Image (tube, rainbow, N blue to C red):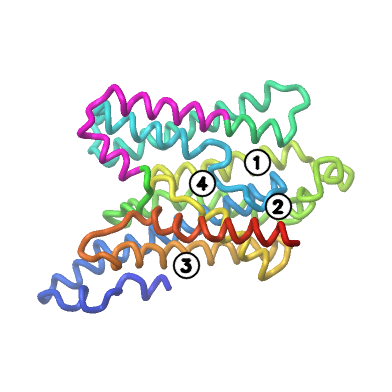
Amino acid sequence: ALIGSPVLPLGELFGNPSGADANLFLNFRLPRSVMAFLAGSSLALAGLVFQALFRNPLATPYTLGVSGGASFGAVAAMQLGMMGAFSQAASVQTSAFLGALLSIAIVYGTFRMKRRASVTTLLLAGVGCSFLFSSLIMLLQYVCDPAKTIHTLYWMMGGVFATGFADALRIVPALVAGLAAAALLTRELDILTLGDENSGARGVNVGRVRTVLFFTVSLMTAAVVSQCGPIGFVGMMVPHACRLALGPLHRRLVPASLAAGGVFLLACDVVARTVVSPAEIPVGVITSLCGAPFLLYLLSSRSRA
């Protein structure tokens, strides 16, 4: 999928004058496909870990407010013109990442303030943080330049905004850290689905494992959102589909979710840039169109069960 997606559609790529097709492939299509694959893999892996932490198959990488913080940072950069010594794109990416880090700090700080905090406390802190940043985004859009609102709206739809391999490779360090944590803690992830008390009785240091997974996976999500915007439903659909196909063991689910998430977002990106070509649909719209029916099906099937 990673090799084939950059050449689609064939007529558009190979119908260009000599030399232009190679430039299009190497400098635009291939980096974009690599970015889509890495982002999809990261979101799917993050969703898998959060579903185990919260013992909820409907959990997503954005459950803890990382998306809200990153969106606020990006909107602040676009609306307030916080460019500094950076280019506009680099300024937005940097501000989005810093906003995501702020959200992570608020959620974890709130979680640690409670003496006997549970996973429910972590979840509620994330929900509250999401509402806080959503309110701040609406405030910025109301008081700032209305002409810039369309740019912020497009960014918040989510898209693969790669203009070279450097953009794609910025995700790699966070992805490697998240993958290493998930791969080394597959047994602990299996046991965490039984609950905190049962996990502790089986020798799992619940607090330490939860902290390691929270930070590594949240930073991985922050890296993706800062580059691509909040692309929804990938982290909810892909891990659940892999779990239905392969069972509950995370030593199987980690590599399967990693590969399936990358392929899924690649396919959505191909649809996004070809269905109304030469115009382009934000890939977050395509994933949402796929995710909403999947969620309704999932809820109805669980109700019947």
Residue 175 numbered tag: none
CB atoms at circles 3 and 2 under 8 Å apart? no
Q: Among all residues in the image, which is located at the extreme left?
A: 17
Instruction: Report x, y in % for residue 287.
Output: 44, 57
Magenta segment: does it hold 137?
yes
CB atoms at circles 4 and 2 under 8 Å apart? no
Residue 185 numbered tag: 2
Q: Nearer the viewer, mark 3 or mark 2?
A: 3
Which of the two labelled residues, at mark 1 and mark 3, occupies the earlier sequence position? 1
- In the image shown, does 137 or 64 lie closer to the viewer? 137
Q: Which residue is mark 4?
A: 220
Q: Amino acid at mark 4?
A: Met
Q: Which residue is mark 3?
A: 263
Q: Amino acid at mark 3?
A: Val
Q: Among all residues in the image, which is located at the extreme right?
A: 201
Which of the two labelled residues, at mark 1 and mark 4, occupies the earlier sequence position? 1
Residue 212 numbered tag: 1
State the CA–CA distance, disc 3 to disc 2. Answer: 24 Å
Which of the two labelled residues, at mark 1 and mark 2, occupies the earlier sequence position? 2
The residue that appears at 81% across and 41% down in the rendered structure is 196
CB atoms at circles 1 and 2 under 8 Å apart? yes
Quadrant of the drawing holding the C terminus: bottom right
Magenta segment: does it hold 283?
no
Q: Place residue 18 in its image quadrant.
A: bottom left
The residue that appears at 53% across and 43% down in the rendered structure is 62
